[in-house]
């Protein structure tokens, strides 16, 4: 493959709802451009993009994969992404390094929840967006209805650049509004039918208006001539796409490929080159800065994805934002503060690699044999230690407790999962001392299934997962005080410690305070730290459920000691016992973690979802409309949300999605508190 200058590069990330044909479109683009000699098929397991065994098995993309197209003197990197919410981490990573996003919409179903989510990913990164309406040949496809759906739910600035033609209710071809060309249902050239010429003129007028609005001079030319020249039109559309003031809509089929050539022609014309991209926020030496796309500047690249390759081991995928490298070069991993030697880098089409002899600004490449580099790291020229602001990945929404099937494999499991978590920032492994369990969190049940399958393949470790314990807290609701005397004589020196403690409730989230109000030396000053240690020990396991105690102020205000038998240990034991006894008289209550959910669902499922949330002790905080979808905001106890991803899929026919954030702790209802206390006593017995 020849080397391309930065202005001749484009990176397009393909996104959309699950099962709308994104991967098939990517395969069709490769085949149409002549990048491959056979058309890949998801159904037959021959896709150039879905080459992972688990992707083939499930017929779903479970990772971002790339392909390279050479077209009209340009190199176009096409990145296919998962449409399943469980793997949105890969989608977000790929969107972050793209020059533009291609949003795929089904020609029958139109805008769905996944369409909105992936559109939001592009909008959050301020990426230009092109739209592809797929499968326009189906009997129940309706391009006009889908375009209106897009304009209503996504942007009124979405305008068809190509549109399908029907004859007697059957699909016969596609018309290009800009060029006046048309192709038939097999992709062969055909004349534009007279029946659609009015529609063509309508769309062209809308496109011309969008181009004119992108530039004052073009607007003046438009008012003066009531039209724009071809050059003026292209200039205006390029500006309009780059500024997100225009979203060109294309359409076609993936099997057989029809309409892809029109899209490929438009990408270099509409999508800004890497050199026209915005400067990226970064930091250097603790100071905020920016990295502008500069081919002659110092080398700076971001790792947006990583995986284990059967032949090459761990490989990372990078996007070069500044400068370039050639041959074997030492670079600096700014995120990890470690040196790396880059000498094995490749351009990838599916699982096939082409050795690269250099990388330039705008290139996307795979790099092998790095020692300590993973997703979200910044690689930079040595001596230019600037770190790009990290990609913001979503918080996990599914959590399980995990253990190896065979004892003795704990370390091996932990090490293997840590490697996977470094590759995928939406996978989080924690050793949670508060509940005494190791937990694994991800974006959904399928996400964790796939990750644990990869763990077994890489390490041989099989695991078991189960419902995690809830990190309940205990606190008090009123003041109380009392005393405890620890006195023990067993021959020789005895033990004596005597304390009076007062407990006071603190505001939620205040934690713990300790104070001494002892006067007259009844408890010598040197024993006060031991009293505090005893209380701190007691806070780890409260008297009603063995949970952590929070939001309490403890005051030691009196006591007594023995000149021989008193010791730090004696006072520690006394204060520990005293705290537990006094707390039982201070109105102890149990607190549970609460999360805030934002659930996005089609309107027809809203009632079922709200009813289910209410049954889970959820409190509906508000509802907002997002086109044909409703966003339900609710606060729900964490204890009620185990496997909620599966519940929501069942309630919405897999058309709903949600995000969650920790909201704090709230009191547990009394009847549930009693049940939890009984369970704690049963475990103790």
Image (spheres, rainbow, N blue to C red):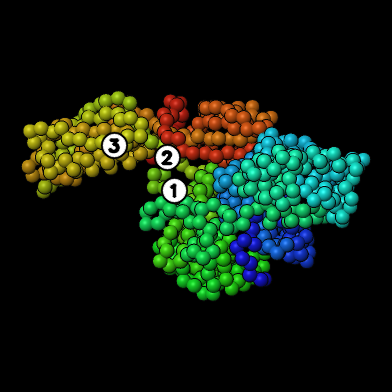
Q: Is residue 582 above or below residue 101?
A: above
Q: Residue 473 versus residue 661: which sits nearer the camera?
A: 661
537 horizontally vs 132: left or right: left
- Neighbor class of circle 1 (other Cα within 10 Å; few <14, some 14-19, many 20+) is some
Residue ID for mark 3: 512
Mark nearest the camera among 2 and 3 is: 3
Residue at 89 percent of width and 52 percent of height? 190
Q: Which numbered disc flags the more N-terminal residue, 3 or 1?
A: 1
Q: In what element is the residue under mark 1? A: strand
The disc at residue 471 is: 2
Task: Look at the image and tell me whether residue 125 can be seen.
Answer: yes
Residue 217 got which mark?
none
Q: Is residue 570 left or right of residue 195?
A: left
The quadrant where residue 272 appears: bottom right
Residue placed at 82% from the left, 45% from the top? 164
* Quadrant of image for the N terminus: bottom right
Residue drawn at the location 29% of the way across and 37% of the way down: 512
Foreground mark, 3 or 1, reads 3
At which x and y percent is residue 488?
A: 16, 41
Q: Could you tell me which secondary element the residue under label 2 belongs to?
A: loop
Of residues 360 and 573, the one drawn nearer to the viewer in this rendering: 360
Q: Quadrant of residue 348?
A: bottom right
Q: Residues within 10 Å of mark 3 (few under 14, many from 20)?
A: some
Q: Nearer the viewer, residue 597 or 409?
A: 597
Residue 425's spot in the image, x, y percent?
51, 53
**Distance from label 3 to label 1 (Cα)?**
24 Å
Residue 637 rendering spot, x and y as whole percentages: 49, 33
Q: Is residue 66 above or below residue 395?
A: below
Please give the residue where the numbered disc 1 appears in the rendered image. 437
**Residue 11, image x and y in percent?**
63, 57
Q: Is residue 300 above or below residue 249?
A: below
């Amino acid at each position: 493959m020849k080397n391309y200058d930065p202005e001749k590069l484009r990176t397009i990330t393909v996104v959309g709802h699950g099962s709308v044909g994104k991967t098939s479109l990517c395969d069709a683009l490769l085949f149409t451009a002549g990048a491959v000699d056979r058309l890949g098929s998801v159904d037959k397991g021959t896709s150039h993009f879905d080459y992972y065994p688990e992707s083939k098995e499930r017929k779903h993309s479970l990772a971002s994969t790339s392909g390279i197209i050479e077209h009209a003197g340009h190199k176009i990197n096409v990145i296919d992404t998962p449409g399943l919410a469980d793997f949105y981490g890969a989608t977000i990573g790929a969107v972050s390094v793209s020059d533009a996003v291609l949003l795929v919409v089904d020609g029958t179903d139109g805008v769905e929840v996944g369409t909105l989510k992936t559109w939001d990913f592009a909008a959050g990164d301020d990426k230009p967006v092109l739209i592809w309406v797929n499968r326009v040949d189906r009997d129940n496809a309706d391009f006009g209805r889908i375009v209106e759906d897009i304009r209503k739910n996504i942007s009124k600035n979405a305008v068809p650049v190509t549109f399908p033609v029907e004859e007697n209710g059957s699909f016969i071809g596609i018309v290009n509004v800009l060029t006046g060309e048309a192709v038939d249902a097999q992709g062969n050239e055909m004349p534009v039918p007279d029946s659609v010429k009015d529609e063509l003129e309508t769309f062209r007028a809308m496109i011309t208006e969008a181009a004119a609005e992108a530039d004052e001079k073009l607007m003046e030319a438009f008012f003066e001539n009531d039209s724009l020249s071809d050059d003026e039109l292209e200039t205006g559309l390029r500006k309009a796409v780059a500024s997100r003031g225009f979203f060109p809509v294309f359409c076609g089929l993936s099997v057989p490929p029809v309409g892809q050539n029109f899209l490929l022609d438009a990408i270099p014309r509409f999508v800004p080159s890497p050199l026209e991209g915005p400067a990226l926020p970064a930091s250097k030496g603790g100071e905020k800065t920016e990295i502008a796309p500069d081919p002659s500047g110092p080398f700076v690249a971001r790792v947006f994805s990583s995986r284990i390759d059967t032949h090459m081991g761990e490989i990372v995928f990078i996007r070069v934002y500044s400068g370039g490298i050639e041959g074997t070069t030492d670079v600096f991993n700014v995120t990890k503060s470690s040196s790396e030697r880059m000498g094995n880098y490749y351009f990838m089409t599916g699982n096939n690699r082409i050795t690269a002899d250099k990388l330039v600004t705008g290139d996307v490449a795979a790099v092998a044999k790095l020692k300590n580099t993973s997703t979200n790291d910044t690689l930079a020229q040595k001596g230019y230690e600037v770190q790009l602001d990290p990609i913001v990945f979503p918080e996990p929404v599914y959590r399980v407790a995990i253990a190896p099937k065979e004892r003795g494999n704990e370390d091996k499991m932990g090490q293997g999962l840590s490697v996977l978590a470094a590759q995928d920032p939406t996978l989080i492994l924690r050793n949670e001392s508060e509940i005494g369990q190791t937990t694994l969190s991800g974006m959904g049940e399928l996400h964790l299934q796939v990750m644990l399958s990869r763990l077994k393949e890489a390490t041989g470790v099989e695991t078991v997962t189960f419902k995690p314990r809830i990190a309940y807290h205990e606190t008090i609701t009123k003041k109380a005080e009392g005393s405890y005397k620890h006195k023990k004589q067993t021959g020789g020196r005895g033990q004596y410690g005597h304390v009076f403690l007062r407990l006071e409730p603190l505001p939620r989230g205040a934690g713990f305070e300790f104070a001494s109000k002892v006067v007259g030396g009844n408890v010598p000053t040197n024993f006060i730290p031991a009293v505090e240690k005893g209380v701190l020990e007691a806070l780890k396991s409260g008297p009603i459920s063995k949970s952590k105690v929070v939001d309490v102020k403890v005051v030691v205000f009196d006591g007594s000691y023995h000149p021989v038998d008193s010791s730090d240990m004696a006072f520690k034991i006394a204060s520990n016992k005293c705290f537990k006894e006094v707390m039982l008289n201070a109105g102890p209550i149990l607190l549970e973690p609460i999360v805030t959910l934002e659930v996005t669902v089609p309107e027809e499922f809203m009632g079922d979802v709200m009813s289910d949330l209410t049954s889970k002790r959820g409190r509906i905080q508000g509802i907002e409309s997002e086109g044909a979808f409703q966003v339900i905001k609710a606060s729900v106890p964490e204890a009620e949300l185990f496997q909620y991803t599966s519940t929501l899929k069942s309630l919405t026919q897999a058309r709903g999605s949600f995000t969650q954030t920790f909201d704090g702790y709230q009191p547990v209802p009394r009847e549930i508190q009693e049940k939890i206390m009984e369970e704690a006593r049963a475990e103790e017995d």
